[in-house]
Amino acid sequence: MKTNWFTTALIFLFPVLAFSQTAGELFTESTALDLFGAPLANVTVNHAEFESAVTYASASGDKIWFWFDETRIEFVITGRDQKPLYFNGTPDLEGKLARLASISLVQDLLNSNPGQPVHLQIRPNHVFSVQCGGTVLERIWPCPPSCN
């Protein structure tokens, strides 16, 4: 009978666990440097402007998409509907790599460093990070395969 209870519990818990995952992880600046290397490219965004993009993205879901082109150092931020909320080059998404982060983590990053500029960064091995003050958002999901 224990096996049936365990199997039943897994069946009910799997959907909750599978779809409640947080996309990304916050690190101190020194830990991010040790784990992921120094930024190869950096674009600075005004805190209020970035926060506004996050607020608009939150209206369409709990994730935010960061699109970037490593060759031209261009970034685009979108919500679930893929409408550009911020961009520093062209808003065209074609040819750009995408990363997906939980809005709650992005808000935690901003709230822990009020008024500090936000840095969108490319690190070695196509690693994308968002830094604000001494806190870095990393381990953001690549899209594809994790696009929801």
Image (tube, rainbow, N blue to C red):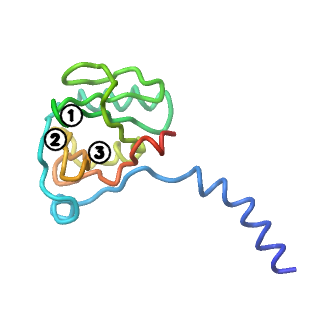
Say whether marks 2 and 1 touch (CB < 8 Å): yes
* Mark 2 lies on residue: 116
Say whether marks 3 and 1 touch (CB < 8 Å): no
Mark number displayed over residue 47: 1
Near mark 2 (Cα within 10 A), the count class, few <14, some 14-19 or many ≥20, is some
Where disc 2 sits, the SS reads loop
Task: Write down the quadrant of residue 76 in the picture.
Answer: top left
Mark number displayed over residue 111: 3
Horizontal and vertical percent for residue 8?
A: 80, 66
| Spatial separation of the CA atoms under disc 3 and disc 1 | 10 Å
Q: Residue at x 28, y 24 (%)?
A: 86
Say whether marks 2 and 3 touch (CB < 8 Å): no
Task: Write down the quadrant of residue 116 in the picture.
Answer: top left
Mark found first going from the N terminus, 2 or 1? 1
Left or right of 85? Residue 145 is right
Where disc 3 sits, the SS reads helix
Mark number displayed over residue 107: none
Residue at the far bottom: name it: 2
Mark found first going from the N terminus, 3 or 1? 1
The residue lying toward the viewer, choosing from 119 and 93, is 93
Horizontal and vertical percent for residue 29?
A: 17, 58
Horizontal and vertical percent for residue 132?
A: 20, 46
In the image, what residue type sits under mark 2? Gln
Please determine whether, in this image, residue 109 is positioned above or below residue 55: below
User: Can you tell which of label 3 and label 1 is closer to the viewer?
Assistant: 1
